[in-house]
Image (spheres, helix red, strand yellow):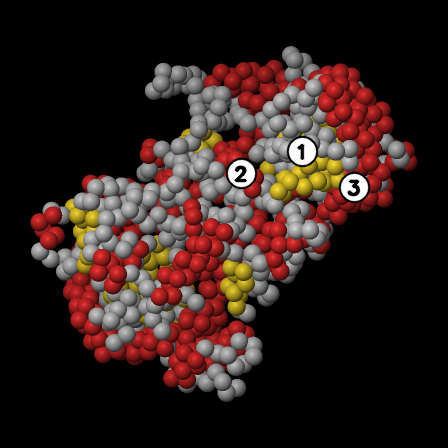
Amino acid sequence: MTNESCDKPAVMAFEVLKAAIIDGSAARLGRLALAGRRSIETPNYFAATSRGVVPHMTPDNVNKHLQAGGAYMALEDFIEQPQQVVGTVRSPPIYNAPTTELRPRKLHSFTAMPPSVLTVLGARRIPAVPAPMGNSNSSVSVFTSNGFQNLTTKDYHAAIEALRPDIAVPLADLALGAITPTSKRALRMAERTDEWLKAYFTDLNTDSVLRPHGIATFAPVLPIAYSIQWEYLERLSEDLVPANQISGLAVYDPDVVPDMLNGYTNLTPLARLSLATPSTPQQILRQVSLGLDIFVLPFINAVSDSGIAMTFTFPPPPGEPPLREDGTRTLPLGIDLSTPAYKTSLAPFSPSCTCYTCTKHHAAYVHHLLSAREMLGWTLLQTHNHAVMTSFFTSLRATLAEGQASFNDAIRRFTRVYDTEFPAGTGERPRARGYQFKTEHGAKKMNTKPWKKWDDEKIAAVRKAGIAAKLEKKLAKEAQLANGLEGNGVETPLVPEDDADELDHRGFAKIVSLDDTKDK
Amino acid sequence: MWAARRMASAMSASSAALTFELVAKCSTTRARASIMTLPHGPVNLPMFMPVATQASLKGLTPEQLEDTECKLCLNNTYHLGLKPGQEVLDAVGGAHKLQGWDHNILTDSGGFQMVSLLKLANVTEEGVRFLSPHDGTPMLLTPEHSISLQNSIGSDIMMQLDDVLVTTSPDKARMREAMERSIRWLDRCIAAHKNPDRQNLFCIIQGGLDLDMRRECCRGMVARDTPGIAIGGLSGGEAKDDFCRVVGTCTQLLPELKPRYVMGIGYPEDLVVSVALGADMFDCVWPTRTARFGNAVTKFGMLNLRRDVYAADFGPIEEGCGCPCCRPADQEGSMGITRAFVHHNAAKETVAAHLLTMHNVWYQLHLMSGAREAIIADRFPAFVKEFFGRLYPDGQSYPSWAVDALRGVGIDLIQT
Ligand SMILES: [Zn+2]
Ligand SMILES: [Zn+2]
């Protein structure tokens, strides 16, 4: 290790503003500061991206309407080899992205991520698709849009140097999938991760690469028992922290944190990034209590895709929740905009929300967009749901500032008042986008009830002929080939989903008697 | 109904819900620059109207659509009639409120979709008959239904229900029947229209490719004095020469102080030639639809950004374009989007389609505002030559229909 860096500060400063381990809680207030960026108050969250974008959010919308201070990106989203040239290896285009004064980092400039949003680079998406083959001693298996490929430690380190994320998460040897690793496997995970971290600092010298490039390192903490990874953690604590080589910890299992902090107080001042994918606010609160500071939250994207608008607040509203139809007395975490209840609702999703969606639009519009499968529906939900998470963390910090006692009290009330899960969402999801969703196919087919023919000759006569129709077919085929964005290239629903009475009722057309139709 | 009232200036005319002000005329061609003031504000003509079929422009927020400087977009009555339906539209207070759009909206009649998309229609004097797909119940869509729906939508410009035939239909008698019926249906639409003080009803000229029939229709329709006039039935099937002949014939017969709308066209060449022939307004789903297949419309032609050659192309979608995607990376309001980034996400993340939609809409709108500026500066012929010169840099392979049509209004593309 390079000991000359001892007297220099870490690349990223994390300041603990308030911490008190009382009443079984290790929750703390902090501030993450990077040179030239607005600082990030913690606890807080980072957005999870897919292929470098916050799903459904163009960069201008991210800039205007999202307050997320950071975005997590996975290298596996950028390094696929094009199918046409399998056999030859092409340097992934992102490595050649030009930089500008405003976006001096390639990861930022390639993804057009607004400069105000800092980036975290990991090798794999969170959560990652398990690879059929395990990792080797010098590489991990990653899943690109063109299939699995090996990513060597060398290549990963080179990628970090080239792309310059604000925060890099060194490779961890993870056993993905449902099965808990055997203690033998777990021990190898710790050993490999330790080896890889050594290689990381060999390939990426702190003084000549990481510091001048402004890349902070968040060392992985493995999702295995403390007793198995203590040697690895000890090295973090005894070698790397004193040398100011790591700024934070990337935690895959929050339950390791209490033991780790007991064992190594040196690690206490480091920022703790949760990659443990909590899927509800309750799970976030639990992780905050365990001492986690920043959270990567893919569940926001999933909740938006399911047509749910989040409606919870922290602390919860005072008083007992009203009795619900099913006899329970809890508040839902969100509302299902696909249900007919919102057909004509001009109200915002939640009255206190100040997001773009809630101030400029209403539930009826989003209900319509979801029902019509218009992409904007998911954009508006993303805008709102990210805003809800932002204010959740803002008030969480305010409550924590009042003291652990009121924080713990608010958590207890939150747990009592709210449902433990988001509503399932009855609407159709956006079309599965690409390879990461292979196992999730099964979106309902659009209504395919055929029209009965009225008059073949006349139909033939009025059919849109010629170029337009041909073009239509060609485009539809292209869309299918491209695993396109909407159901099988069908633009918009062409066939009414409702029966004649409903169409008549809606003023779309009127029912006529059969006798009446024959003479004309 | 519509009573044309001459304004102080002889160059403008007003009706209850529309003022048309002719700003400039090209001294060579029949191109015009004007301002059409509608209930939700003024719009500059000539213009292209993007199509927000189901009250949403394919993933763009109304705020982003505003950023493209769009002041008038189109909604489809057929789609809004199905979803969310008239009852919801009435409850919500119309399509502007539904989609949070404070600018103008134009709606079609819904008849075109019934006939061409559903392939189900039996058109009778009463209206369009079809069988409900669920139970085979016979149903009828009448001019009165269409107007009632458009009244509920609250569009600034509504279109009459017309008897649409493809222009290539060989049946002359049927074509005449459709043309005459469309005039009768206009009368029914006018009678059914509940809000002439705040919604404009445009007629639609029919008559296929038969110029005499088109002339006859023009006379019949113009006599009914609607605030604006559309030329219908031209959306793709016919030869481009025929298309130009129809547009050129109609514009010559139409009153000068009313907006002229050629329905369903959107290819850049078609727009520029139609402007030269004296048309003011256009709409087409093509620029937004093609965006979802990875296609960028640019002044140098179409680029399919899904092609591998763009994987490492770090130029903007279109060099020199001022849209939020393309303007120089460090400029105010620029997203710094590259072709490589669009390629990276095309057909994989919806964001790529949204970005191309934004660019393509900007391109179409700015093509028309560029034409407008050229008309006002009386340099429209030069604008047309530059436009075609960029698309066909060899200076040779101009499409003959465009050469002929432009020659007819005094522009010779070949001679420089
Ligand atoms: Zn909101
Ligand atoms: Zn552009």
Q: Does A399 appear above or below B206?
A: above
Residue type at tag 1? Met
Asked if ligand 2 lies within 8 A of label 3, the reply is no
Residue type at tag 2? Phe
- Is the C terminus of chain A in the top left, top right, bottom left or bottom right quadrant? bottom left
Viewed as shown, does residue B1 lie left or right of B35? Answer: left
Callout 2: helix, strand or loop?
helix
Chain-order first, disc 1 or disc 2? 1
Q: Horizontal and vertical percent for residue B137? A: 18, 44
Q: Whole-Å distance between the Cαs marked 3 and 1?
A: 19 Å
Chain-order first, disc 3 or disc 1? 1
User: Residue at label 3?
Assistant: A154
- Is the N terminus of chain A in the top left, top right, bottom left or bottom right quadrant? top right
User: Is there one chain holding both mark 3 and mark 1?
Assistant: yes
Residue type at tag 3? Lys
Q: What residue is drawn where x is 46% and y is 35%?
A: A306
Determine contact: label 1, label 2, CB under 8 Å: no
Q: Nearer the viewer, residue A386 or B134?
A: B134
Rendering quarter of residue A474: bottom left
Query: Which residue ends up furthest to the top in the rendered image?
Result: A23
Q: Nearer the viewer, residue B358 or A233?
A: A233
Q: Whole-Å distance between the Cαs marked 2 and 3?
A: 29 Å
Q: Nearer the viewer, residue A193 or A334?
A: A193
Callout 1: helix, strand or loop?
loop
Q: Horizontal and vertical percent for residue B39? A: 32, 58
Give the crowd class for mark 3: few <14, some 14-19, many >=20 residues within 10 Å. some
User: Residue at label 1?
Assistant: A133
Q: What residue is drawn where x is 17% and y is 48%?
A: B138
Callout 3: helix, strand or loop?
helix
* Mark 3 chain: A
Which numbered circle lies on residue A437?
Answer: 2
Does residue A145 appear anywhere in the picture?
yes
